[in-house]
């Protein structure tokens, strides 16, 4: 079974400071990893994904994430936080070996609050 | 590209009635569509996965007869909540994916309130 852990319910960061939202995962094979962002009463927006290749993945809105196989982590980062980045962030994983069934497991979400 | 729409964005209905929610992929053909339910301050709970032209695969604990899913074409899937009750009130989100790609593209969600 695959699982995702987001250990922090909420992350507070001052505007202009770097931010990190943590994610660890567990899969039986090799992982597809994703980050999504959700604004209030909205669906999820795709930020970035890791499938293979460089461990540092760059995505939308200046976000990036680093895949660390030994630590089974995929932390989301941004060098300089904006107030508009305040939202709910979901990490998700899919086992590449799951074939045609594309079930993705989502973490519980981390609320990011950027303080002006 | 990769835009998914949902209709309606919100709906209020009386207990015992049925409600249909549409999910459309506007600019791509979705080989697979997913329906999620999200409770306040909680993650997404996958309800079912549907492939065009075949029966949906429901997750454990999700009532097939209550949450009817029809994936009529490569751009449209519908979720019908039958005989709705107040406990069915929730935020329902659909997503769609394309063949060979890992990411899902999400609709904006539908807020269902059952009185």
Image: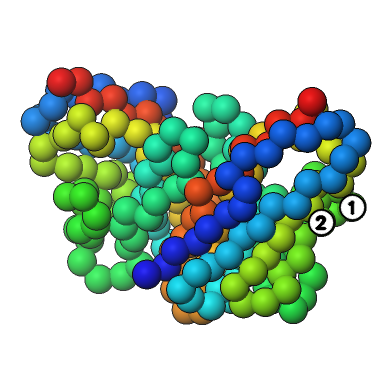
**Tags 1 and 2 both on a single chain:** yes
**Left or right, A53 with reference to B11:** left
Decide if residue A12 is on the left or right side of residue B78: left
Q: Which of A72 and B79 is in front in this view?
A: B79
Q: Residue at x 24, y 55 (%)?
A: A60
Residue under numbered circle 1: B65
Residue drawn 13% across the image and 27% down it: A15
Q: Visible in this render: residue A4?
A: no
Q: In this view, does A59 lie above or below B19?
A: below
- Residue at position x 84%, y 38% from top? B84
SS for dot 2: strand
Judging depth in this view, the residue of A56 and A116 nearest the camera is: A116
Q: Mark 1 lies on which chain?
A: B
Q: Quadrant of residue A98?
A: bottom right
Residue placed under numbered mark 2 in the picture: B68
Residue B72, image x and y in percent? 73, 73
Going 35% across and 33% down the picture, which residue do you hit?
A: A87
Q: In which quarter of the image is the C terminus of chain B?
A: top right
Residue A95 on image: x %, y %: 50, 63
Classed neighbour count for the residue bearing mark 2: other residues with Cα under 10 Å, few (<14), some (14–19), many (≥20) = some
Q: Judge whether B35 appears above or below B75 on screen.
A: above
Q: Are marks 1 and 2 in contact (CB under 8 Å)?
A: yes
- The circle on residue A91 is none
């Amino acid at each position: 079974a695959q699982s995702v852990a987001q250990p922090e319910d909420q992350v507070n960061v001052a505007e202009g400071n770097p931010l990190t939202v943590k994610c660890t995962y567990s899969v039986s094979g090799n992982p597809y990893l994703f980050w999504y962002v959700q604004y209030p009463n909205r669906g999820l927006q795709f930020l970035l994904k890791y499938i293979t290749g460089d461990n540092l993945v760059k995505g939308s809105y200046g976000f990036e994430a680093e895949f660390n196989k030994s630590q089974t982590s995929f932390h989301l980062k941004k060098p300089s936080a904006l107030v508009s980045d305040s939202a709910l962030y979901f990490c998700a994983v899919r086992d590449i070996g799951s074939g045609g069934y594309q079930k993705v497991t989502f973490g519980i979400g981390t609320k990011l609050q950027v303080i002006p | 590209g990769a835009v998914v729409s949902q209709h309606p964005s919100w709906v209020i209905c009386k207990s015992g009635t049925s409600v249909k929610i549409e999910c459309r992929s506007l600019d791509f053909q979705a080989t697979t569509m997913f329906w999620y339910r999200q409770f306040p301050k909680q993650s997404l709970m996958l309800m079912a996965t549907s492939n065009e032209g075949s029966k949906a695969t429901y997750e454990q604990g999700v009532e097939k007869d209550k949450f009817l899913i029809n994936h009529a074409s490569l751009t449209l899937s519908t979720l019908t909540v039958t005989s709705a009750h107040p406990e069915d009130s929730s935020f329902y989100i659909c997503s769609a994916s394309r063949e060979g790609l890992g990411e899902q593209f999400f609709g904006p969600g539908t807020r269902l309130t059952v009185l």
